Image (cartoon, grey):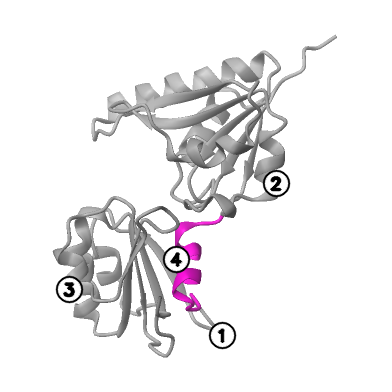
Amino acid sequence: MKNKLGTLYGIGVGPGDPELITLKAIKVLGQVDIVFAAASTKNHHSLAMDIARPHIPESTPVELLRFPMTRDKSETRRAWTANSQRIIDELEAGRDAAFLTLGDSLTYSTFGYLMQFVKASAPHLGVLPVPGITSYQAAACRLRTPLVEGEGTLMITSGATGGDRLRALSRKPETVVFLKAYRNLPDICSALEESGAYPYCVGVKSCGHPGEEIVTDVEQLCRQAPDYWTLVIAKQNASHEPAAE
């Protein structure tokens, strides 16, 4: 009789608010045999694990996989290979595994890369992503402003290289969201100002986390110390103003 193979579930646990984890994610967490999450090689902490932990049975083992924060591609690849193999070993042994990630499992997610490595090394294994609520969806709800309406366009982009993605577009989208703004806020704000197209521009720091902050003065946002969990929502239609708290 052929041995049963396990399935890998990529679970998006939402942006931070513990009430924004989905019922599907909770169901899967109650059924898998082991739960993994990513952590930096510099610490022993996973915010995604903190969010999901109340829904993980005490008897289920949890394990943090170390990923280096480096631009050294060879070191990064070694980590991805080793971590994907660690998961493959569990699946080959017939155990179902979950990998936790903040936000959505396939939107700027560690799981997206991990899934590619697992599929490349073990294409016979099952991989099932479980969608989650993104930080920009949660931020739009906090601001009580529609992200996009009618025939409008919405651009979601990484701010890791500043505002160059916006500058490269001859036709600007009605709404643009910069994720991973962090240290590149000044250049992102410059790109928005250069376009002359976005009278509505709001920064949201640590959306859904303790210490969440909404900053409607973009110049003030750029003067503040950089926060890793910062996103910017800019809109051409300024009719929807941030709700007063």
Q: Position of residue 110 (x, y in %)?
A: 45, 39
Which type of secondary structure does the marked residue at label 1 adopt? loop
> Would you name the residue on which mark 1 appears?
150
Badge number at residue 209 = none
Q: Are marks 4 and 3 in contact (CB under 8 Å)?
A: no
Q: Amino acid at mark 2?
A: Lys
Q: Amino acid at mark 4?
A: Ala
Label 1 is placed on what type of residue? Answer: Gly
Q: How much space separates mark 4 and mark 3, taking CA atoms?
A: 19 Å
Give me the residue at 14% from left, 65% from top.
Answer: 223
Segment tinted magenta in the rendering? 133-147
Label 3 sits on a secondary structure element that is helix
Q: Which mark is residue 219?
A: 3
Q: Residue at x 51, y 19 (%)?
A: 85
CA distance separating discs 4 and 2: 22 Å
The image position of residue 37, as x and y in percent, is: 49, 31
Label 4, on which residue? 139
